[in-house]
Amino acid sequence: MHTETVTIQRTFRVVRHEEKVRKWTEFSFETSEHTVYTASVYGHPPIREAMQLTVAVPRKGAWSEISGWFDHVDGCIRMEGIGGDLGGAITLLACVGFTLFMLMPGSQPPNAGQMAGLTVMLLCALFGVLFFGTRLIRKLRARNQLRRLFPDAPEVAI
């Protein structure tokens, strides 16, 4: 996880998205060094001019994948909670467990239709675990990095 401190001089094109499962914000901003046209962060955090932020991104320049930030003005760490990703990963792991239980030796062999259904369910569950697990790991790494830098800062869910 990479952290970078920036001072936002101007913001533009702030668009807040909301779906049933997740919220995210896309925005563009200028600093004294550069202009970023495709920044994206989970949730709906306050975005204003003259903000000084330490952002957590997976790698340098990955502004479209901001996992959280520390706001130097209000002294808070802002990031999306991990509950949705954790719940999704646990649900999908339960699907995998059910599928494996159905295929255990000693149970009645599944017919071709059941086998196709179990295969599709297993594949969907594995892709879901990868998706939710990746997001969850990214958020946990960002939280640990920001906590290491700002140990006394309160955390605010966005």
Image (spheres, rainbow, N blue to C red):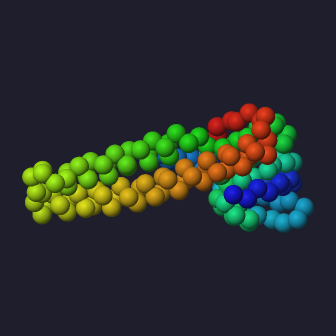
Which residue, as the protein is rendered here, is positioned at the far right?
Answer: 32
Query: Residue 46 at x, y = what percent?
Result: 73, 42
Judging depth in this view, the residue of 10 and 22 nearest the camera is 22
Where does the C terminus fall, quadrant-wise? Answer: top right
> Which of the 4 image quarters holds residue 118?
bottom left
Q: Is residue 69 left or right of residue 24?
A: right
Q: Is residue 134 left or right of residue 49?
A: left
Query: Residue 69 at x, y = what percent?
Result: 73, 47
Q: Is residue 13 visible?
A: no
Judging depth in this view, the residue of 100 and 134 nearest the camera is 100
Query: Residue 39 at x, y = what percent?
Result: 69, 59
Where does the N terminus fall, quadrant-wise? Answer: bottom right
> Who's the residue at 30% across and 58% down the image?
122
> Who's the residue at 48% across and 57% down the image?
131
Judging depth in this view, the residue of 50 and 135 nearest the camera is 135
Which residue, as the protein is rendered here, is positioned at the far front?
Answer: 106
Q: Is residue 105 left or right of residue 24?
A: left
> Who's the residue at 60% across and 54% down the image?
138
> Who's the residue at 19% across and 53% down the image?
104
Judging depth in this view, the residue of 29 and 83 nearest the camera is 83
Q: Is residue 145 visible?
A: yes
Image: 121 above or below 43: below
> Which of the 4 image quarters holds residue 10?
bottom right
Q: How many labels were placed on the picture?
A: 0
Image: 26 above or below 78: below
